[in-house]
Image (tube, helix red, strand yellow):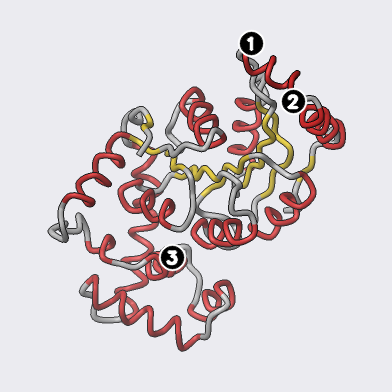
Amino acid sequence: MAPTVDASMEERKMDDFNEAANPAESQDHASCGKRRTARVLIIDGHPIVREGLRRIIEQQDDLVVCAETDTARGARVAIEETDPHVIIAEVSLSQGDGIKLVREVRAHYPQLPILMLSMHDEAIYAERMLSVGANGYMMKKATGEQILRSLRRVIDGGIYVSESVAANMVRRATSRGRHVPASPVDRLTNRELQILHLIGKGLSTREIAGLLNLSVKTIESHRRRIKGKINLRSGTQLVQFAINWFVGENTGALSRGDPEDGQVA
């Protein structure tokens, strides 16, 4: 999907220019509690999710959607054309995945805030996304109010995670190497988790290699290490495990209760 760009982009760029050219006026607005209007780029593979996010965001005076897309390639184009102030992106994209997206954005736009929004279990993904450069992680079961709060927090330079993720990060930091993984999947490296995720989506070894710009031999080596860490004996077992895990992550995230309030880690 090509990025959908807001037609009033040039007007907002001029507003930003005027704001920069009149710092006294900008300070007066800030002192009165008025925030600068922040441009939000939405990256998600589901049109209904993008529509819902756009509706939530554009009801706010201080936020506007500048573009939306469903692929990492579309995201690169949209960033160049619309100069967003923040990205809100899904972990699972129709082409690629969140870890690769965050790494690519961070490499070229080190100061651009990124909020990840996902159905996947935050216990597995949240810390990993922060470790590669994301500024926050929010479950898709979150309320509109929580999404807006998390967006504003990362725009302001903060980190947004749930209370349980923040507590787990503290436990890891104070465990002095005594942390025991909650599940076999937690033993995987970011790359191995990325590959397990793509296997679960139904991609072949060759397709994964092409998507990640790696050799088939490298992907096969990762598959062997994944099998060893999860204690699987065959490629068939790996594929079945990956599919069950991927489906369970998506359906399980929808069946859990209300999300906890986000906290600064």
| Image location (x, y in percent) of residue 84 | 69, 42
Q: Residue furthest top?
A: 32
Q: How crowded is mark 1: few (under 14 residues within 10 Å), some or many (20 or more)?
A: few
The disc at residue 32 is: 1
Q: Is residue 133 left or right of residue 184?
A: right
Give how far across and how far down residue 20 sits, in percent. 77, 31
**Circle 2 sits in a helix, a strand or a loop, which is it?**
helix
Is 21 left or right of 175, judged from the image as shown? right
Asked whether, in this view, residue 248 is left or right of residue 49, the answer is left
Q: Spatial distance from mark 2 to mark 3, Cα to Cα? A: 45 Å
Dot 2 alpha-carbon crowd within 10 angstroms: few under 14, some 14 to 19, many 20 or more: few
Q: Which amino acid type is marked by label 1? A: Cys
Q: Which residue is drawn at 23% across and 63% down?
A: 184
Do tag 1 and tag 2 residues touch (Cβ < 8 Å)?
no
Secondary structure category for the residue under label 1: loop
- Residue name at image x 79 percent, y 49 percent: 81
Q: Residue 194 carries which label?
A: 3
Q: Nearer the viewer, residue 173 or 204?
A: 173
Instruction: Name the side, left or right, on which 244 lies relative to 174.
Output: right
Residue pointed to by mark 2: 23
CA gap between label 1 and label 2 equals 14 Å
Disc nearer the start of the sequence (1/2): 2
Q: Closer to us: mark 1 or mark 3?
A: 1
Q: What amino acid type is highlighted by mark number 2? A: Pro
Q: Where is residue 44 in the image (x, y as percent from the top left)?
A: 59, 47
Foreground residue among 146 and 245: 146
